[in-house]
Image (cartoon, rainbow, N blue to C red):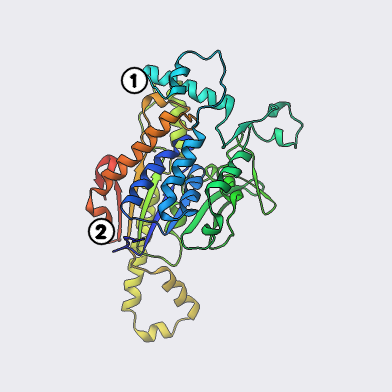
Amino acid sequence: MKKQHAPFERIALILQGGGALGSYQAGVYEVLAEKDLHPDWVAGISIGAINAALIAGNPPEKRVDALRDFWQTITATPPAHPAYLPSLWGLQATGIEPQHDVLRGWSNQISAFATLINGAQDFFKPRLLHPLLAPSGTDNAQSFYDTSPLKATLERLVDFDRINTGKMRFSVGAVNVLTGNFTYFDTTTHTIGPEHVMASGALPPGFPAVMVDGEPYWDGGLVSNTPLQWVLDSKPRCDTLAFQVDLWSARGEFPGDLICQDIRLKDIRFSSRTRQATDQFRRQQRLRRALARLIEKMPDAALLGAEDAEIDALISEADEKDYNIIQLIYRAKEYEGVSKDYEFSRTTMHEHWHAGYEDAILTLRHPEVLQCPTSPDGVATFDVHRKKQS
C-alpha cells in the first residue's frame, strides 16, 4: 500500500493515555488511513498503547476494523445492571441519549457508575472481593478490577508476530513499581507481547501491576502521558511528520467549584503540555543546526587534530532534520464531567470517534501540515483547534 512520506522520511503516530476517551484516537487514525498516511512508528501510553497495538498488529486494510471491533466490544451494553438506577439508564442502554446538556450529564454519570459496578466487557471486570477486605499480597488486594479479559481481547485482535517483525516501529511506556523508573518497551529492544501493552495501562488502584520479565509495572501516565519526547529524541534522526493525538487539554478555564476543580486537576495531571516540550525541542534543534553549520566551517586540519571521540560526539548531535508536529486534542464537552475517562457508553464512544475523525479531516485541509517547515530551526507545530501555526 502506498505511503505518502514525501517530503518526510518518517511518519510517527503518538497516542496519549485517557481511558474511555481513546476512541477519539481511532477516529483520527481512520482519516490517516483514508489519506494513505500510514505511520512507520506508533507509540502510545495506556489506552494509547492499546490503540497502538491494534494498529501495529494488523495489516493496513484491517486496522480500522480492529479498532472498531475493540471499541464496540468494550462499550457493549452490560448483560445486567442495577435495577434501582433511574430511567435515564434505559435511554443509555438503548443508545438513545437525552439532548439537553443537564440530562446528558446525568446520563453519562449513570453510565460511568455502571462501569464502576460492572467493569467494561472484555476489558476489565470487578474483583469478587473488595481489595480492602482481601489479605495483603493476594491478587484481590492489588486492585479494584481484574484486567485478565484484556489479555484475551488483545490476543484475539492483535498479531504480535506482526508487531515484532519491525516493519512498523512500536513503543509503549510503563513505570517500574520497584524502581520508579520510566521504561519504554520498544520493538528495537524488546519482543513485544500482551503484557507490555497491559503494563502501559495498569493504572492503580483500578488496575493491578503487570509483571514483565519478573518486574511489576504500572501505567506510564504516572510519569509521562505521552511518548512525544521518546520519538523526537530517537536516533538516527529523521525528517519526521508527527501526529500527536491527545485526550486531555492542558488549557482550560478556572474552575468555579470543587467538581470543576476535580475535572481541571485531571486535565492538568494527564495533559502532555506539548507546547513546553516542543519549545524545548525547538531550542535543541536550533543548537543542533548551529553545530552542523559550525562543523562544516571548521578546517579539516582542526578536525583531524581533535580526539575522535570528541568529533564523534559533536557529529552525533549535529543535524538539519525537519519536523512537523501536528497536535490533535480532544476537547471534552461540559456534560462529560470528571468521569469522562471511565464512561464507556456506546453513544459517547461514537461521539469521541466522530470528533477525532472531524478534527483530522479539518487538520489535513491545511496543506502546510504536510510540507517541510520553513522556520530556521526546522520545526513547525500545528494545532487545528486554535487555528494557529508556529
Near mark 2 (Cα within 10 A), the count class, few <14, some 14-19 or many ≥20, is some
- Mark 1 residue type: Gln
Choose top left, top right, bottom left or bottom right for residue 130: top right
Q: Which residue is drawn at the image coordinates 34% and 61% (left, top)?
A: 3
Name the residue tied to disc 2.
371
Residue 212 in picture, x, y percent from top left: 65, 51
1 or 2: tag closer to the N-terminus: 1
Please say if 209 is above or below 120: below
The residue shown at (46%, 27%) is 338
Tell me: residue 277, above or below residue 293.
Answer: above
Count of picture labels: 2
| Disc nearest the viewer among 1 and 2 | 1
Residue at disc 1, secondary structure: loop
Which quadrant would the N terminus be assigned to in this image? Answer: bottom left
**Residue 188, image x and y in percent?**
53, 63
Q: Which residue is mark 1?
A: 99
Q: Nearer the viewer, residue 386 or 36?
A: 36
Q: CA distance from mark 1 to mark 2?
A: 41 Å
**Residue 379 visible to the viewer:** yes
